[in-house]
Image: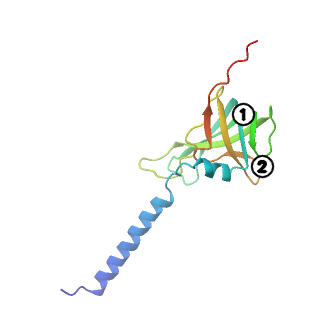
Amino acid sequence: MKLSLSFWWALAGCAVLMGDVFFAGVSMAALPPLSDAEMKESADVVVTGQVISEYHRIVPLDGGQGMTDRQWILVVQVESVRKGEAKVGQLMYLHGWNPQSRPDGFTGAGGHRWVPAPGQRGLFYLKKSTRGYLSILDPNGASTLPEQPSKTP
């Protein structure tokens, strides 16, 4: 059976279209967790500290479809400095985000997977932006630390 040239062009077009769909999904997938070594290497600043407060806002995204992000800032009092420029006792303002609303079936970046809440202690791997902001590394640049034992005389 001999197939026409138009059949082969149609088949090639379908293959290109399927490749675009496949690779678009791959390029928009959520980031895998960073290893400890990757976080240490990528971070400009690494600190431990207690979260004093959190401020957030809901921001609509360009492109519509009702998508919004929850952008937040954690105010953290530094307890120790493991890398970079920071001082014990200093208040740092750490930026991050999470998707707030997405359409059903959406795949894409997932923001920060988890961050300590106000009153909790944490370990933070931070990247300094070109504008000087400190952002927690995506997606897992923050983790909870155990409470410090109280100092009793």
Work out which quarter of the rendered image holds the C terminus and state it. Answer: top right
- Decide: few, some or many residues near mark 1? Use Cα within 10 Å; few <14, some 14-19, many ≥20: some
Residue beneath label 1, please?
75
Q: Is residue 116 visible?
A: no
Q: Nearer the viewer, residue 119 or 111?
A: 119
Q: Dot 2 lies on which element?
A: loop
Quarter of the figure with the N terminus: bottom left
Tell me if residue 65 comes above or below residue 27 in the rendering: above
Residue drawn 62% across and 44% down? 141
Q: What colour scheme has been applied to the protein in the rendered image?
A: rainbow
Query: Where in the figure is residue 28, as x and y percent of width and height?
Result: 50, 57
19 to 85, vertically: above or below: below
Element type where label 1 sits in the image: strand
Percent across and percent down for residue 55 are: 67, 34
Q: From the viewer's perspective, tell me whether residue 63 is left or right of residue 82.
A: left
Q: Residue at x 64, y 25 (%)?
A: 147
Name the amino acid type tagged 2. Answer: Gly
Q: Is residue 133 above or below residue 146?
A: below
Outermost residue, front side: 153
Proximity of marks 2 and 1: CB atoms separated by less than 8 Å: no
The residue indicated by pointer 2 is 132
At label 1, which amino acid type do we have? Val
Tell me if 18 is positioned left or right of 89 in this view: left
- The disc placed on residue 122 is none
Residue 92 in picture, x, y percent from top left: 76, 37
User: 99 or 152: nearer the eye?
Assistant: 152
